[in-house]
Amino acid sequence: MDSTYNVKVWKTATYKGARGTTYTVRWTLDGQEKRAPFATRALADAFRSELVSATRRGEAFSLATGRPVSHTSGASATNWYEFAIQFVDAKWLHTSGNNRKNVAKAFMTATIALLRTEPTGFKPIDVRTALREWAFNTKRRNDAPPDVAAILRWVERNTLTMAAWEDPEKVEEVLNALATKLDGKPAAASCIKRHRRIMNVAMEYAVKHKVLRSNPLPKGRGTAPKTSSAVDKRSLINPTQAAALLGWVRRRTRGGRRLHAFLATIYYAGPRPEEAVAMYVRDAVLPDEEDEDQWSELLFHTAQPEVGKQWTDTGEVHEERGLKGRAAGDTRNVPCRPALTRILREHIKTEKLKPGDLLFPGEKGGLLAGSVFRRAWGTARKKVLTADECASPLGRRVYDLRHTCLTTWLNNGVPPAQVAEWAGNSVPVLLATYARCISGQLKDHQKRIEATPDLEERHGEG
């Protein structure tokens, strides 16, 4: 039952504090106390009178909100699980695979927090998997195996209604769950912020479709953890370390030369890994072979992020996307230094690649899998770096090769606007990300400052 007639309304409590007086209306539903604070006695008395009138009319009270049923919105008639599925299906065609996957993770956690009872006939991990991989996946839901379908039917029967979002205590409980990992430790600030953003979009959708009267999520500063996009300087790789790491990858027996060319491209030209994966041979505009010491140019126009075949429309592991932060069909040209030119020319010749082939194909000719180059890079770190360096953030991710490239450009005096253009970032994002890593230009800056004439001191005359 979501409502009760067992209601008792108590006298208004008055609390005089340093910041003023608070008047709190108190009542119980089936013995569970509810409270509503007000700044004035008149408001408190008016609210209390409404509660008393509802009890005299024999009106039921919602257990979720604590208010008379007549006070609640259409939320009481809508099951959270049903609403979540409706939201997922409405947004499916208009969102990327990564976004679909993130929504499923957030909704899984929220649904667990909104269950009336703990699952007894199913393992918690099976319930989480059923929700994340099947319930909130529009493409797969109808094909769920019998054991998963049984779990989802149980979840639908045992999920609270949307009226739970009108209860501040329940909202806080859900937000706490979204901010906590399965082991009870706090989740990363970026993860919490992403979950909050997803739930906020869902709540606005509920308001738009008149399921809720207002967005119940807290607003304003301090409601979400602060996150920083700045690069950790400790993750950057110096030239000696880069040479040793890339050299080890090159000597790797299985696909070493191909992976070396791929990683060297990220180190020298700074593309995102998903952009480098999507390159074709024709996208590397190389000079004639006899001009091996000349610069060349790389063209980036597509990204192929890995999201999992269950989240893409095509059923492929990768999802073809445009360049991040760019209009559809936009491209980006990046200079290719002579050292990279030589590496790419040798790579194309050794692999016998044609202009229409992928520049960095996988072993079977398809797109290069992220697991392959991440595993090779991780092994290189263990083989090349010291134990202390390996335990540190130094080059921990393949993406740190891009961070190193962009930082090198900035430290060598390339204007931020030009670096942003080559990197596919806006100037504000670039500076927010890499400003702390810029170094080695202090003396030059001091000379530029000293170039401004000093003011001559003039003593008072007469």
Image (spheres, rainbow, N blue to C red):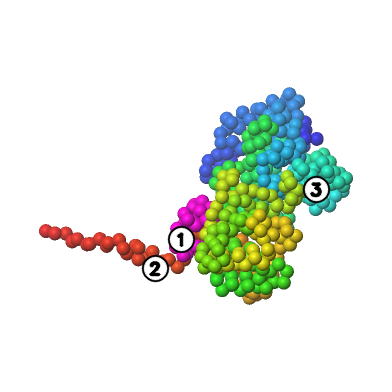
Residue 408 part of the magenta segment = yes
Residue, x 59% and y 62% (percent of image)? Answer: 266
Q: Name the residue under label 1.
A: 414
Q: Where is residue 96 in the image (x, y as percent from the top left)?
A: 67, 46
Q: Earlier in the sequence, mark 2 or mark 1?
A: 1
Name the secondary structure under disc 3. helix
Image-based side of 45 in relation to 150, left or right:
left
CA distance for labels 3 and 1: 51 Å
Q: Mark 3 points at which residue?
A: 130
Q: Which of 322 and 89 is in front in this view?
A: 322
Q: Earlier in the sequence, mark 3 or mark 2?
A: 3
Magenta region, main secondary structure: helix
Name the secondary structure under disc 1. loop
Stretch in magenta: 403-432
Q: How many marks?
A: 3
Q: What residue type is labelled 3?
A: Ala
Q: Name the residue under label 2.
A: 443
Quadrant in which the N terminus is drawn: top right
Q: What residue type is labelled 1?
A: Val
Please identify the residue farthest to the top as the structure is shown.
57
